[in-house]
Amino acid sequence: MEVIKVGTIVYPKDSNYLDLLFQEIKSIKNIAVLLNGNMRTPKIEALHRLIDWLNARKVYGTTDGEHKKIYKLSLDNSWIGSNPWFSGFIESDGNFYCEFKLNSEKIATLVKGYMRVSQKQSYKATTTISKKNSNLYIMEKIREFLDVKNVTEIQRNKSNYIELAYEVRTTKKLSCDILINYLTNFPLFSSKHLDFLDWSEIHNIRKSKIYKSLDGSSKLISLKNNMNTKRTQFNWDSLNRFYCKNVIKVSND
């Protein structure tokens, strides 16, 4: 809201989440201008429809005080590591995981730590998956950036159907190192940032093999038991470094 300048936080009844709504026309325009040229997936089609809607109503972007038509920009095909787009993608569709077994001496074995990100195979539900409609291209770009061997096809169980999806996992240590470096430069800002910090520590324990000691295994257990849905303590100091405050300019018109 601070970046967009307007917006409403809604607390749905009998729920454990919040909705952030942007209904004012100027906020919708600002969002369209911010996203224009920064999209990487077939969802750009929806943005272009929004821009057409704004232009038809003469709700134009503002440059140097002059009202101008918003021109629809193409997909961002730059290197994934060059901007914070992937951070936002992880916020929405990524998770951090840790797996291990304990032997009879309570020492961790077979330690695995990875981030997985998934996306449905097609942007729109159609009988055929075309290049314009497929999310495979962006998942391949992510795979290449993270130095992962393959994009995996998976099935995700929904309430009344099975969704076909693509998945990328950072199973090898080098891929995790690449991700840690990226998210250090372009940090997450939801509670996933805290999961990332714990996961990064797990990764370092895994690399250094500290988990082979009782103290190291105890630390591993503690970190895992406080990640994701098990987290009970939250710290939002990272929001003080919200990079959009410095790089994004929106119109007040």
Image (tube, rainbow, N blue to C red):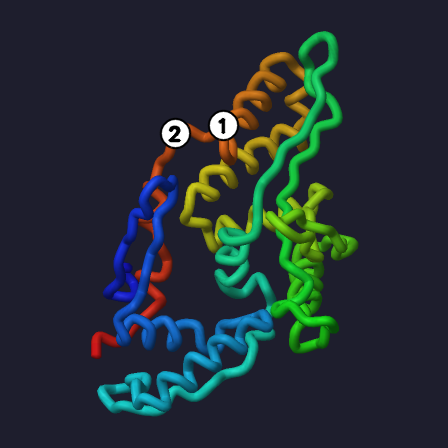
Expressed as whole percent of the image width and height from the top left, the position of residue 144 reads 70, 61
Does residue 65 sit above or below 177 in this rendering?
A: below
> How many numbered markers are drawn?
2
Disc 2 to disc 1, C-alpha distance: 8 Å
Q: Residue at x 27, y 75 (%)?
A: 26
Amino acid type assigned to the residue bearing label 1 in the image: Asn
**Residue behind mark 1:** 226
Q: Residue at x 45, y 49 (%)?
A: 188
Q: Earlier in the sequence, mark 2 or mark 1?
A: 1
Q: What secondary structure is found at the residue carrying circle 1?
A: loop
Residues marked 2 and 1 touching at CB (< 8 Å): yes
Q: Residue at x 65, y 66 (%)?
A: 138
Where's the C terminus, which quadrant? bottom left
Q: What secondary structure is found at the residue carrying circle 2?
A: loop
Say which mark, if any, is on residue 131.
none
Amino acid type assigned to the residue bearing label 2 in the image: Gln
Q: Residue at x 24, y 64 (%)?
A: 6
Report which quarter residue 14 is drawn in. top left
Does residue 212 sit above or below 6 in this rendering?
A: above
Expressed as whole percent of the image width and height from the top left, the position of residue 241 reads 34, 51
In the rendered structure, the answer to whether residue 242 lies left or right of residue 35 reads: left
**Residue behind mark 2:** 233
Where's the N terminus, which quadrant? bottom left
Q: Residues within 10 Å of mark 1 (few under 14, many from 20)?
A: some
In the rendered structure, the answer to whether residue 219 lies left or right of residue 186 reads: right
| 208, 244: nearer the viewer | 244
In the current view of this chain or complex, which residue is farthest to the right? 149
Expressed as whole percent of the image width and height from the top left, the position of residue 121 reads 68, 63
